[in-house]
Image (tube, helix red, strand yellow):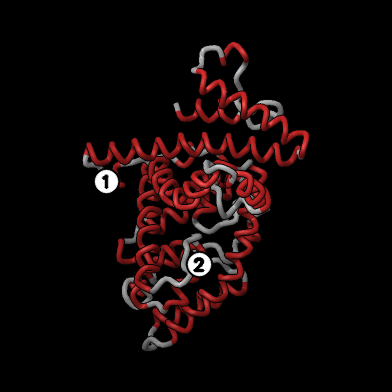
Amino acid sequence: MLCRIRLRVTSCRGLKQSASCLTTSDLSDKPWYKRLAIQSNDKFVAFLGRLSPKAQKQYVQVLAGTKLFYYDAKHAYQLRAKIKAENLHLSDLDWRDIYIKKQISKDLTKVLPTLLLMCLPFVFYVILPILFFFPRPFLSDQFFTREQLVEYNSRFHQTRLTIHPSIVNQLVKKVEQLPNSSETQTFLDALKRLDSNMPLDSRSLLQHKELFEVVLGFNSLPRIHLVNLCQLYSLKSFLLPSHLLRSRLNKTLHFIHAMDRALLRENLQGLSQQDLEKLCFQRGLNSNDVDRAVLASWLGDWIQLSTNLTEKEESLLAHAAVLLVRGQSMRAP
């Protein structure tokens, strides 16, 4: 049902003369106030087309994105009601439902205020130019084309790459403060190999998971380290105290951990290219223009790590967005 709705709405995105996708015969079945709203909207779209074709395209795209966001938010609400009525847990859901539940709760904080402001008289004419020039901070993925998402994701990944050295250096300093042992020395050697484009895998990381339970756990990390981890997962950290940063990281990793268990139950071969790109990017990998086999292999390695960790060891899962990613660029075409 949701897929059929998406296809119907997406077909409206390329229209220039009408954003409503309704013919005159369709309008005759609508109440007068809906006909008035649709006709007014069509006139505004035509006006934008004469004023600026780019502005017209952006406006029609915002309308289509609003519909897509509404349907996804409605699905998330129905899912929440189902969880409450049937006393379900995240472990009972499939990965798509977990993904939508997490993503919509995050997107609501930026999309809902934007849509409410657009409903206010005259404010709409101020908001639309802002959305035209700076769309990403105010809109979610539903409002963008695939080409736009590829561009935005590439920019964000470049930002993540600048954070990698800081996180690795913070781990090195933390481990160097520990009593010297074969385990700590082996882990230090592995961290230093990352700078030589020698990527780690889940098997080598699992050998050191005990370090991330207490010594390198969220409660033992300084604030700057927590801020860097939040930036990896696109979590707001500005002026937030350490305990709120830990809470946000714990919540995000809890969702990803549950999603990984659901993916393990399902067959990765059934995932589409777009699904693989979305899941790998969420976990820190630049998935743009990467072969399907490479994405499936990397995601399988991540799941192997994730499903062998407990909730107390989720700090390792948070760092895996660096430790499993750094040095992997040479494997992407």
Where is mark 2, residue-wise? 323
| Cα–Cα gap, marks 2 and 1 | 30 Å
Q: Nearer the viewer, residue 120 or 270?
A: 120
Q: Amino acid at mark 1?
A: His
Q: Is residue 284 left or right of residue 83?
A: right
Residue neighbourhood size for the residue with mark 1, other residues' Cα within 10 Å, grouped as few (<14), some (14–19), many (≥20): few
Q: Nearer the viewer, residue 236 or 322?
A: 236
Q: How many marks?
A: 2
From what the image shows, is residue 157 above or below residue 67? Answer: below
**In the rendered image, is residue 109 in sight?**
yes
Depth check, front residue: 205 or 140: 140
Q: Residues within 10 Å of mark 2 (few under 14, many from 20)?
A: many
Q: Residue at x 34, y 35 (%)?
A: 78
- Indicate which label's residue lies in the foreground, 2 or 1: 1
Q: Residue at coordinates 75% horizontally, 34% vertically from top-left?
A: 49
Q: Which residue is found at the position 50% from the left and 67% from the top?
A: 323
Lower sequence index among marks 2 and 1: 1
Q: Tell me: residue 254, above or below residue 103.
A: below
Residue type, label 2: Leu
Q: Position of residue 193 (x, y in %)?
A: 56, 75
Question: x, y percentage for residue 181?
Answer: 38, 85
